[in-house]
Image (tube, coloured by chain):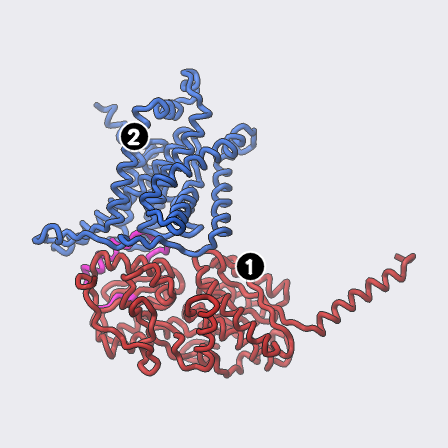
């Protein structure tokens, strides 16, 4: 080396030059853990597409603080242990000052624990199990309403229109399913409904008929189900097979609220209502535009998961622009002070009802009418009139 | 009273229909186990491959999954033979510290298949939208005054019947044909069979192919009632494994009974204990069979025969 001071200098200059160039050009590069393979990949895919649409828009309008936003995706396979190790990698190795994303409650919970421990803010986008924001965490925020609020819209529909006296609850034995079922049980009791059955199942089950024949014997007014994609379709198909004539079949969002549900359950999906957080018909600014853009690009309207991811990207822009620096501490302060409107709805993180840093919002009800999800409740945003009472299976074609 | 009877009968019907399909999955594994003396832990993944084949046959050419019973199992037969010939057999010859590294190899093959499927077909859930998917026969339609209402789903019943037919054909093959007899001879005593002039190596290849073809049949029969995704295999490998243990290692009739028992047991657990317990129940059966009935159902049958 001593013999070639010129070379050394040249190399040094090159290195410096590169890094200066990178800074000047400026890009904010962040990674998002999402299930891109495995059983929850469908949801991960919807979110990924929505993030990319948002990134494109943000960059077209000058990026964040004049820097280009680049989002990368890390596949968590829907497994909490993988999600955890991704979070550790992002925080410890890549020194990412803010983490967001993940789909399921179980995975979000795993990431939240890591983020809180490392004092790096984490925004939960879709994980809905109540206890994620009930742990007195200071660095964990949540955009989506928690499970306790998922069914609020549905309950008002039930109370005002259906007036059921009994309900049977079937749910997947996951964090999301369990907390959804527990909340339904509480709300049903509050509304004076009798919970005749509350049964969980392991995802991937082939045959629901044994449990459904028990439901049939109990004859509830409403069957409320909390499931992911294929179980939802299989449940409805087998309910049709057994001709269980409840007054209403209701789903707790997730698997009941995406277009694939209708594709897989076919005519058995007709008239099924589902709690949901968002629909392309909502009146929030940019909602319709986002839905149309998504449809033009990918062929179908996005489910609420897409809207949540889309809103997350805008929240990111808003927060990073308000934060004093790119340090986790400053970003955390900016997050806490968030008050903004997105295509998904208003976002503001509050400490209320035992929750910390939780966003509260109105939830709606959709119904499958002629093979399409239509918003039916609350009435002012309805895109179609609800159909109730629904015909008995015997009388359907 | 009638209501409870109805729940019980419907559960029993569901259990038997499911059990018939389970049996077909179990037979394939038990056959390979009998001849090879190894547990084929890629069994469920082979079923997944068959299901994808049937799925694409339907999507691209509109071939009904039941018709693809004539196409997919032969394909898997060849595929299974290839696996045995070019992957398992070479490993059999290698000396190693682990006595059963063929078993580990099958796990590896399973992982490769699953990841390849994820790569090529993405991890989307798919199903075949056959018109008859939700066609159902009702007892009250056939017998107006029936005190209980039972429903028989068309695809479930057809799948069950076909499963029975395939099993009978297999029995015929094993009992009456030369090749079948050679396979059984190899399973009973490899050395004796070799001395009698049975080409043991070839029998192994054929058996692996046959086992794959059987699970391919099960795959085709499952498609109209279930759905498919790349990670589906491990679940069914496990089921096949439990059936094999329950039925008695290497026993075909044991696998049939084991499959039916498991199907009924799972359905009954779902109705009378709770559906969330079904997978746990599976393990209870597994452990109980190992502890209390080491030879499986087959040993019970044998004991009775000897008693006579």
Compared to residue B267, the image places residue B175 above or below, namely above
Foreground label between 2 and 1: 2
Q: Position of residue A276 (x, y in %)?
A: 37, 72
Q: Is residue A153 visible?
A: yes
Q: The disc numbered 1 marks a residue on which chain?
A: A
**Residue A211 is inside the magenta segment:** yes
**Residue B223 is inside the magenta segment:** no
Compared to residue B279, the image places residue B296 above or below, namely above
Q: Quadrant where the C terminus of chain B lies?
A: top left
User: Element under label 1?
Assistant: helix
Q: Position of residue B267 (x, y in %)?
A: 26, 49
Among the chains pictured, the one given red colouring is A
Q: Quadrant where the N terminus of chain B lies?
A: bottom left
Residue B171: assigned label? 2
Q: Position of residue A232 (x, y in %)?
A: 33, 61
Q: The disc numbered 2 marks a residue on which chain?
A: B
Q: Which residues are magenta?
A: A201-224
Q: Residue furthest left?
A: B145
Among the chains pictured, the one given blue colouring is B
In the image: residue B163, left or right of residue A332: left
What residue is drawn where x is 34% and y is 75%? A375
Residue A85: assigned label? 1
User: Element under label 2?
Assistant: helix
What residue is drawn where x is 57% and y is 77%? A317
Q: CA distance from mark 2 to mark 1?
A: 51 Å
Q: For mark 2, does the 10 Å Cα neighbourhood hold few (<14), some (14 to 19), or many (20 or more) residues?
A: some
Number of marks present in the image shown: 2
């Amino acid at each position: 080396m001593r013999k070639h001071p010129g070379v050394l200098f040249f190399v040094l200059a090159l290195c410096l030059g590169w890094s200066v160039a990178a800074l000047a050009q400026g890009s904010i590069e962040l990674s998002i853990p999402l299930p891109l393979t495995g059983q929850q990949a469908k949801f991960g895919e919807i979110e990924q597409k929505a993030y990319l649409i948002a990134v494109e828009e943000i960059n077209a309008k000058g990026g964040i603080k004049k820097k280009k936003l680049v989002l990368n995706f890390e596949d968590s396979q829907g497994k909490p242990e993988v999600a955890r190790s991704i979070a550790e990698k992002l925080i410890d190795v890549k020194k990412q000052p803010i983490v967001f994303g993940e789909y399921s409650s179980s995975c979000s919970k795993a990431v939240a624990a890591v983020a809180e421990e490392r004092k790096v803010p984490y925004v939960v986008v879709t994980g809905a199990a109540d206890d994620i924001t009930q742990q007195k965490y200071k660095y964990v925020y949540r955009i989506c309403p928690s499970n306790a609020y998922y069914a609020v819209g549905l309950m008002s529909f039930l109370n005002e229109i259906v007036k059921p006296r009994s309900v049977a609850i079937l749910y997947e034995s996951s964090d999301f399913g369990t907390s959804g079922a527990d909340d339904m049980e509480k709300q049903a009791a509050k509304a004076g409904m009798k919970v005749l059955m509350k049964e969980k199942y392991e995802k991937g089950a082939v045959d629901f008929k044994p449990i459904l024949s028990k439901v049939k014997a109990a004859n509830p007014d409403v069957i409320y189900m909390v499931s992911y994609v294929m179980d939802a379709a299989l449940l409805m198909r087998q309910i049709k097979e057994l001709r269980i004539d409840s007054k209403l079949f209701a789903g707790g969002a997730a698997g009941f609220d995406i277009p694939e549900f209708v594709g897989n359950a076919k005519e058995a999906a007709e008239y099924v209502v589902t709690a949901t957080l968002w629909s392309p018909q909502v009146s929030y600014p940019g909602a319709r535009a986002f839905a149309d853009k998504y449809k033009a690009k990918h062929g179908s309207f996005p489910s609420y998961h897409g809207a949540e991811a889309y809103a997350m990207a805008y929240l990111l822009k808003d927060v990073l622009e308000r934060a004093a620096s790119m340090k986790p501490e400053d970003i955390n302060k900016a997050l806490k002070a968030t008050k903004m409107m997105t295509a998904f709805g208003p976002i503001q993180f509050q400490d209320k009802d035992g929750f910390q840093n939780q966003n509260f919002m109105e939830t709606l009800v959709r119904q499958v009418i002629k093979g399409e999800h239509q918003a039916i409740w609350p009435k002012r945003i309805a895109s179609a009139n609800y159909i109730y009472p629904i015909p008995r299976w015997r009388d359907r074609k | 009273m009638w209501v409870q009877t109805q729940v019980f009968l419907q559960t029993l019907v569901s259990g038997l229909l499911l059990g018939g399909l389970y049996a077909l999955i179990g037979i394939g594994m038990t056959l390979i186990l009998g001849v090879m003396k190894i547990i084929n832990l890629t069994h469920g993944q082979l079923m997944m491959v068959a299901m994808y084949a049937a799925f694409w046959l339907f999507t691209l050419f509109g071939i009904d999954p039941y018709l693809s019973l004539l196409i997919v199992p032969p394909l898997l037969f060849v595929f299974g033979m290839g696996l045995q010939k070019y992957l398992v057999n070479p490993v059999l010859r290698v000396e190693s510290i682990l006595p059963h590294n063929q078993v580990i190899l099958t796990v590896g093959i399973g992982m490769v298949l699953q990841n390849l499927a994820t790569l090529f077909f993405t991890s989307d859930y798919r199903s075949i939208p056959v018109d008859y998917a939700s066609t159902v026969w009702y007892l009250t339609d056939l017998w107006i005054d029936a005190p209980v209402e039972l429903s028989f789903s068309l695809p479930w019943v057809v799948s069950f019947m076909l499963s029975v037919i395939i099993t009978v054909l297999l029995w015929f093959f094993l009992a009456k044909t030369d090749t079948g007899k050679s396979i059984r001879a190899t399973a009973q005593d490899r050395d004796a069979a070799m001395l009698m002039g049975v080409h043991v190596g070839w029998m192994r290849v054929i058996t692996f192919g046959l086992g794959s073809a059987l699970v391919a049949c099960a795959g085709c029969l499952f498609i109209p009632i279930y759905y498919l995704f790349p990670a589906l295999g491990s679940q069914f490998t496990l089921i096949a494994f439990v059936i094999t243990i329950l039925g008695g290692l290497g026993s075909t009739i044991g696998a049939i009974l084991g499959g039916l028992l498991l199907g009924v047991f799972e359905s009954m657990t779902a109705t009378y204990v709770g559906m969330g317990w079904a997978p746990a129940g599976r393990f209870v059966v597994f452990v109980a069979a190992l502890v209390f009935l080491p030879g499986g159902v087959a040993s019970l049958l044998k004991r009775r025969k000897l008693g006579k």
